[in-house]
Image (cartoon, helix red, strand yellow):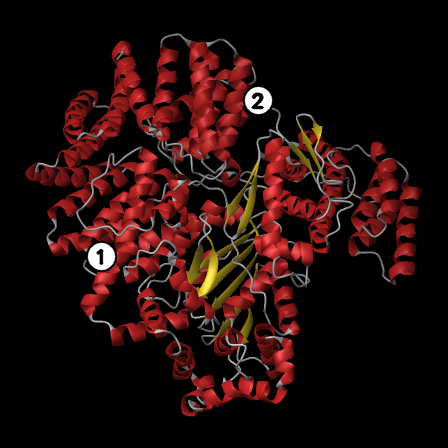
Amino acid sequence: MSPLAFRVLGPLQVHGPDGPLRLPPGRQEVILAALLLETNRVVSTNHLVDLIWEDNPPETARTQVQICVSRLRKLLAGADGEVSITTRPPGYVLHTDAGNVDAALFTGLVLRARRLRERGELDQAVRLLRDAVTLWQGDCLSGLDSGPLANKARQLNEERLTAVELRIQLELELGRYDGLVGELQRLTREHPLREKLRGQLIQALYWSGRQAEALEAFRTARRFLAEELGLEPSRELRELESAILAGRLPAPAAPAPVRVPADRAEEETAGAEPEEDPEPAAASPPPEALRQDAVPHQLPAAVADFVSDAGRLAALEEALTGRPGRTTVGLAAITGKPGTGKSTLAVHVAHMLSETGFPDGQLYCDLRGTTGTPATPEEVLGRFLRALGIPGQLIPESLDERAEMYRTRLASRRVLVVLDDAAGEGQVLPLLPGSRGCAVLVTGRARLTALPGAHRVELDVLAEDQALELLSRIVGRERVAGEAAAAEALVRTVGRLPLALRIVAARLAARPHWTLASMVQRLANERHRLDELAHGEMTMRASLSLTYEGLAPEDRRLLRLLSMAQAPTLPSWLAGALLDDRRPFPSDLMEPLVDVQMLDVAGVERTGGFRYRFHEIIRVYAREQLAAHHTPEARQEALARMAGGWMHLAQQAHRKVYGGDFTVLHGDAPRWEPPASYTDEVLADPLAWLDAEQASLCGMVEHTADAGLHDLSWDLATSLVTLFEVRGHYDLWEQTHLSALAAVRKAGNLRGTAAIRASLGSLYMSRNQFDTARQALNSALDVFQALDEPMGEALCRRDMALIARTSGDDAAALELYRRSLADFDRAGDVVGRAIVLTQSAHIRMRQGETAEAQNQLDEALDIYEGVGYTGGRARTLRRVGQLLLEQGRSDLAVLTFTEVLELCRDSGDVIGEGHLLRDLGHAFVIMGRPDRARDFYDRAVAAREGVMDFGGGALARLDLARLLDAEPGRSRELLVPAVEVFRERRMGRELAEAERLLATGC
């Protein structure tokens, strides 16, 4: 099947297997172009509406966008290409291989060229830059009529010229002066204002022996700039002239190659092969999202009715994008009392600068500074490193190591970091990048005066004209103009506080028959409280109470109960759980609260349902009402239903991943089941759901532990290991389990205590903390034996066998595996049996018992295929490939490794991909095909080091050095950094071999 090819670097074109596809002109072209410019990333529906209609969209705009997307889906599906458009909140994603889109190809080639330059490989960098520029067939999206898209097109056009300038600079550094003169003369005529090109022309002329022409080129530039702009040439150009006149112009020289430091230990410790690769997960993000060139776009949606002071926006832009001579990271802090719009301003500014000021991405995190559980710097750095392409398994444990990796990752990028709701400077300082190309925008209630060099904005209430403008945007300009005096009185009555004004305006918008004067009269009845609006919380409470008291009794009850939810955003099914209402569309329960802005719509789920969120001040108000109207027993019952709903969904997600309730223990606490149709749709991609709801699920573990719902707490915690193992979320694994452990111990829950201890044993084993793991597993096993719990015994003995196997005690490992198999059989857990068979088969292979190993692997594969567990199948197939290699069936081994490699790539398992590339290298060495082996080892080095896994990269370097005995220079280049990594990680066997190869001159 021939894939579709998309071209945006020139006129918009789509080429399919049978030639060009005809795109209907107009809206479909605009939408497709927007999706292609953000390939494999979400483009919001609001953004698409803005692209088509700009400032005046019709009421049916979103529906028309949906129709256009539907037609595009049919068009692309009919072309038989490997491409799809899927709905992802808050919009759509066009999925295709990045190699099918010329803009993505261009960006990737330029990025690779820059890295090659950093390593000193200038020739190859020049070739890649030439390839990148040849992709262009004219100006980006030429002929497409969309003003907002033109801004992105101009940015790409600028990147094209920047790539040309970079390529010319590299060729100057290589001494190719003569061949550049003609091209530079043409480019300076086409782009006369680009002084960098003029400087390159002057250098090329001078070093071609044409000093007089070089001086004339400078004078031509001076005349042009003076006549056109009234400016003198830049300092760089003037310095070139002075150097030529003095006869001291230095030849262009390449910078010294840059070496990135190692930061993470390799899983494959001395004397032991890594026993379990992270399982390939079908729901993981595509590999592009985990590569070194991952570009995060984490900003929340900006509000449409934003109002602010233009001078304030300009000052923030200057502070973040850079004042002249700035040598430090751009830093701005927005502070103020609750309800003044700190987050709204920050998100607006971030969107305003995202494309032009920070093209390498935007990171965002709610630091939860006003909650009881602020985010820790370690937690935030873990999130950011994953967004920047580092797999969870490679993220260090300590704060200092995470901060170092974070700064390294951002060192050559232009990224904007938005830290919302900071508790204080101590929470922010570890999150500051070190590069002056990056910037950080912080919001918080505290003034944050200890942030060094920060531009500070302290928000107060709106100016009167801004308050009237905000009221007009929500209520309608004609309505405000018709009652101008009443409008002025209204904004004065609510103290011009943005949140209070929004709430009152929402009531007016929902009741078009009310006059503004009548609302002023209603507020006058609360005069004594509203007079205090600008003085603190009491005034906010009075303003909120106006809306709260206008709700129906059931809506007020829901608002109160929803305040118990500690999730960042709230799915609609929570309303049904809290009220024990099993209607098929629980969002109907939420909408009355949205109408009066007591809840905000935060996005759209893959099911098409909405997600909601509280403003924090409204949540505080609702909690006060909760304490006043509900007994502790009623609150506990509602919390149990809410937690039961999360538990049901997490259990169903585990079942879909593993093909059933395998390899996990469950408690007896009751579940609350959301509508079946919702469950089926939202769990169509179970790991993606677990990823998306990670914060909510982990928060619920701690919430239930604190509330004494110990059975739900431990059950949910152990169920989440499905996510923690695949994604390498070891810190979350420990955090949730320690919370649940405290709860079950306090309640005397022996089974729950053993389950948590057993799961912690698996965690400690994953961290290579084998002594701690043994203690946890032994204590859990004692309890499971006393309770006659075969599943618990099976899990403990399986992990204890893995520890013995890693320690080289094969006999003990095989005996533990034998007993674990019997336990899994007693429990009826076939997947657990298959995992044990796969692990023990590796020992059989080492002992030369190939027939027994083959039988065990065959049985494991039959089980995995029967239940549909893709991750287990991939692990077992890799062992099959290794067995085939030992049996001398190299061709079949290569086919098997290739199949597993594709599974890893499909699931985004870049660590597994690195292992498989090494396996393929080993296979081709055995087959006597060193050229192919060298290619795979090279790719293994790039794959491992591309995600900063320098331990895995060092092993692949050692493999490659063994192969290159005839190239001592290249071998030394490979081995020197590998020796440093082996020494740091105490990998004695590998270190000894690498030093021996260096000593023998390999």
The residue under the point 60% across, 48% down is 67
**Three-letter amino acid code of the residue under disc 1:** Ala
Whether residue 883 is visible here, answered yes or no, is yes
Q: Residues within 10 Å of mark 1 (few under 14, many from 20)?
A: many
Q: Residue furthest front?
A: 513
Q: Secondary structure at mark 2?
A: helix
Q: Which mark is residue 705?
A: 1
* Residue found 54% across the figure and 88% down from its top: 517
- Which quarter of the rendered picture does the N terminus lie within? top right
Residue type at mark 2 is Gly
Decide: is 786 above or below 502: above
Q: Camera-side residue: 606 or 187?
A: 606
Point 58% across, 34% down: residue: 83
Q: Which mark is residue 969?
A: 2
Asked if residue 226 is positioned above or below residue 988 in the image, the reply reads: below
Is 633 or 444 nearer to us in this picture?
Answer: 633
**How far across and how far down the image is residue 481, in percent?**
65, 82
